[in-house]
Amino acid sequence: MNKIYFDHAATTPISKDVLNHMFRILEKNYGNPSSIHQLGQSSRALIENSRRQIAKAINSSSKEIFFTSGGTESNNIIIKNLLQPGDHLITSTIEHPAILKPAEDLAQNGIEVSYVKPNKYGIIEPQKIEKEIKKNTKLISIMMVNNEMGTINPLEEISLIKNNILLHTDAVQAFGKIPLDVSKIGIDLLSLSGHKFYGPKGVGILYKKNNVFLRGLITGGGQEQEICAGTENVAGISSIGLAAENIIKDFGKNKSLLNELTDYLINSLKNHDVNFVINGKNRVPGLLNISFPKMLGQNLMINLDLHGIAVSYGAACSSGTPKPPRVLLETGIESNLAKSSIRVSFGKDNTKEEINYFVNSLVSILSKELKNV
């Protein structure tokens, strides 16, 4: 078989129509969006159209949408520029490093940080956040969907306890998998990344409620209302708008397919008498963190790669470490079981035939490897 890609949580392949759209813009729309001549203004029009597409996709005003280089920059802008010495941040122990690393930096500079642990199912409970709220709490940052387990956090419930505290969510793993309506959820700030929903890498989105003031990390020409200075990536920005429009248009079809593939994999593993444990509950469709007891997840990932199948051990940004995935340990999972895990994440072009090949390869690998245990 051809290479099988089951690592969509790390990144998605860019859709063919989005890629063709991007190529056309790179060739035809090379004007600087800040220039007042026609070539410049045609580039500006593409950016503003994408802003409207994103706003429609998450039910916001286009004036609340800003373009960045990715989810990491969006997170850093929010975390590092909203808080001053003496302020208090509440986040969780299972956030992406793009939240945890900036939080560590803040803690070294006079900002108080509280970390909430997930329950055993990998979910952040609102009551735990409520217990951490103080008079100086200025920001709560909780991811919408965990990137390693796919667990969905109850953001609507969390928004009900925040009072006048700002609420941010890293929604990078959520967009396109679950409904995302910023008005309904009650969030003030949100981060997205285009390469997670079949768009290009190097382009991200920052949603900011109109009444929230933000400054950028980099000063310069004042682009994106000084939140993300520098000449805009017109082709990337326009393409992320098309990708967002596509993912919303195909939301129901994709959700149905991902649920079908998820159930098919679980049933196939059971039918082959494979010993496995699924980590986390209340998950988005198409993202599974699975432990295979007594089999090291890293070894399994490498062996599957030799069979032409791409999965991951933990998050992509930590796949090179032999340590058990930190997120799983935070839920209380025993270290050896955490070390035996892999992450399998499907996309809109995956098939049951690919799952059949995956399961057959998995059974073969496990039978050989476990004989040596």
Image (tube, rainbow, N blue to C red):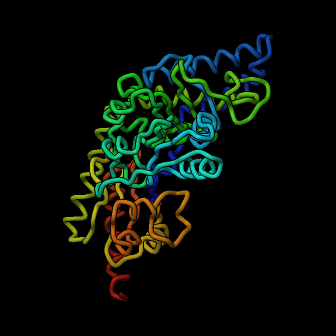
Q: Is residue 96 above or below residue 130?
A: below
Q: Position of residue 231 (x, y in %)?
A: 76, 28
Q: Quadrant of the N terminus?
A: bottom left
In the picture, residue 229 is in which quadrant? top right
In the picture, residue 307 is in which quadrant? bottom left
Q: Nearer the viewer, residue 20 or 114?
A: 114
Q: Position of residue 319 (x, y in %)?
A: 52, 64
Q: Quadrant of the C terminus?
A: bottom left
Q: Nearer the viewer, residue 88 or 39?
A: 88
Q: Is residue 327 left or right of residue 125?
A: right
Q: Is residue 209 left or right of residue 200?
A: left
Q: Position of residue 165 (x, y in %)?
A: 45, 31
- Identify the residue at image location x=39%, y=26%: 186
In the picture, residue 199 is in which quadrant? top right
Q: Position of residue 293 (x, y in %)?
A: 31, 74
- Identify the residue at image location x=46%, y=19%: 60
Q: How many marks?
A: 0
Q: Is residue 55 above or below residue 298?
A: above
Residue 53 appears anywhere in the view = yes
Q: Nearer the viewer, residue 82 or 210?
A: 82
- Identify the residue at image location x=56%, y=31%: 206
- Identify the residue at image location x=28%, y=39%: 256
Residue 203 appears anywhere in the view = no
